[in-house]
Amino acid sequence: MSFDYDAVVVGTGPNGLSAAISLAQAGKSVLVMEAKDTIGGGVRSAELTLPGFIHDVCAAIFPLALTSPYLKTLPLEEYGLELVHSPLELAHPLDDGGVVVAERSFEATAEKLGVDRDAYITLMRSIIDDWDDIAEDLLGPLPFPPKHPLAFAGFSLLAARPARNLAKSYFQTDRARALFAGMAGHSIMSLDALGSGAFGLVMSALSHTVGWPLVRGGAQNLADAMGSYLKSLGGEIVTNSPVESLDQLPPSKALLLDITPRELLRIGADRLPFGYKRQLGRFRYGPGVFKIDYALDGPIPWTAEECSQAATVHLGGSLEEIAASERLVGKGEHPEKPYILLAQQSLFDPTRAPEGKQTAWAYCHVPNGSTFDMTERIEAQIERYAPGFRDVILQRSTRNTAQLEAYNPNYVGGDIVSGTQDLRQLYTRPVPRLNPYVTPLKNVYLCSASTPPGGGVHGMCGYYAARTALKNI
């Protein structure tokens, strides 16, 4: 049989592009097919509100890209990528008008935590000192045995705990507990769930090791840099090429799919064995998000000045309030006071908005498939810490879970991490297999965030899928 390419990759999210680049680096001929008119998947930018206001459509802040064992090896700066850091990595305002912050230095962060200073230093030093080793084992399939067994075992003992329990056992003050709760909220799980503590530890460690940067000019520039590097290696990219069936793809020695189990069932149902289809049908998708992009007449009028020094702001008050919000979402309800992740990129990247204007990006978690309009509740939370915020809004663009899924089919029900990332499914995604990237179809592989290590802009799902494929090409 003749082949047009060594490999065909479907999807140009960071995992699809990482898979393609890894294959091209090995000297293989690669074609990447993208359904939309631009590449990037969850890493795109567009004028969503008014002309001249550049918004990140999905991902906005990129600590995992900096710590990724694979992405950090790529010469993306040579292809136009420039990352921007804000003076503070994160701000978390409180109801007393104060704020708790994460700085690059974990010691400096701890100094502002009062009686919890020593506890924070003890907790974070145990992870940060071994972070590179932990990240290598964590950002991939279940390591057996781990490459760094002592570091990984120590981290795992802490990470398996519920975030709420971990915060209350380590910290005495509301400030330290709130900071950790905001970090753990990135899990999109109940903070009482086993394993939710891992997200609090990882996001905290990232703030102190590589920081939480944004991309100058918009997230699209990260995808474009990856695409340009791939082309320099001889890879080909075609856009406006939706895939309706596996049978329509060009002949190749390997096929790598940056898609979710639901999409694989759609385009490969006639070729997949019944048992595997049944397993894919059991894959669990998690809560979705409701997202708002703002064009603003000026900066957000934060009560706490430190919030103006951070590209990322967590809104949600105390540990107990954030835990209650996430618990309600898990029960299929819409919290009155949602936990919000907010980014204000234009404060630190003036290319994002016209002179004197600003942008903001915010989302909260909602039940999977929700079409409830959370605009009023999100803006009430922002006003809570920035009175007068509504007065600076020029235009807003909202997307509910259905609109997010229509934009990117990998966001099933608005689930931006392509599947629940709890202990039951983190390493067994999409189905329990010794190698999670292989499928029952010969030389057909999954490389999306529905495989380990899951969601986030790190490219490791694509990298490991490509490594598997290379053994058979």
Image (cartoon, rainbow, N blue to C red):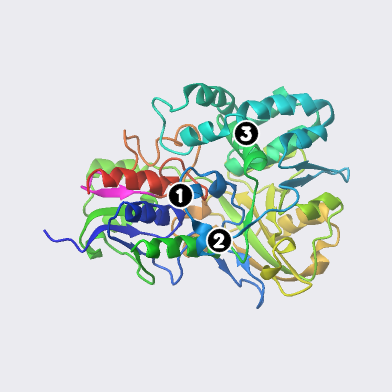
Q: Label the magenta part by its dominant secondary structure.
A: loop
Task: State the SS at label 2.
Answer: loop
User: Residue placed at 28% from the left, 47% from the top?
Assistant: 469
Q: Nearer the viewer, mark 1 or mark 2?
A: 2
Dot 2 surroundings within 10 Å: few (below 14), some, or many (20 or more)? many
Query: Residue 163, percent across and down?
Result: 64, 31
Query: Residue 294, percent across and down?
Result: 70, 66
Residue 132 found in image quarter = top right
On residue 287, which mark appears?
none
Q: From the viewer's perspective, tell me whether residue 415 is left or right of residue 319.
A: left
Query: Residue 290, percent across and down?
Result: 61, 56
In this rendering, does residue 43 appear at all?
no
The kind of residue on which mark 3 rests is Leu
Q: Is residue 306 magenta?
A: no
On residue 201, which mark appears?
3
Residue hosting label 2 = 81
**Label 1, label 2: how many angstroms apart (C-alpha)?**
16 Å
**Label 3, label 2: how many angstroms apart (C-alpha)?**
28 Å
Relative to 108, does residue 252 appear above or below in the rendering?
below
Residue 183 found in image quarter = top right
First in residue order: circle 1 vs circle 2 = 2
**Label 3, label 1: how many angstroms apart (C-alpha)?**
20 Å
Dot 3 surroundings within 10 Å: few (below 14), some, or many (20 or more)? many
- In the image, the segment drawn in magenta is 438-447
First in residue order: circle 3 vs circle 2 = 2
The kind of residue on which mark 2 rests is Leu
Residue hosting label 1 = 459
Dot 1 surroundings within 10 Å: few (below 14), some, or many (20 or more)? many
Q: Nearer the viewer, mark 3 or mark 2?
A: 2
Relative to 424, does residue 214 appear above or below in the rendering?
below
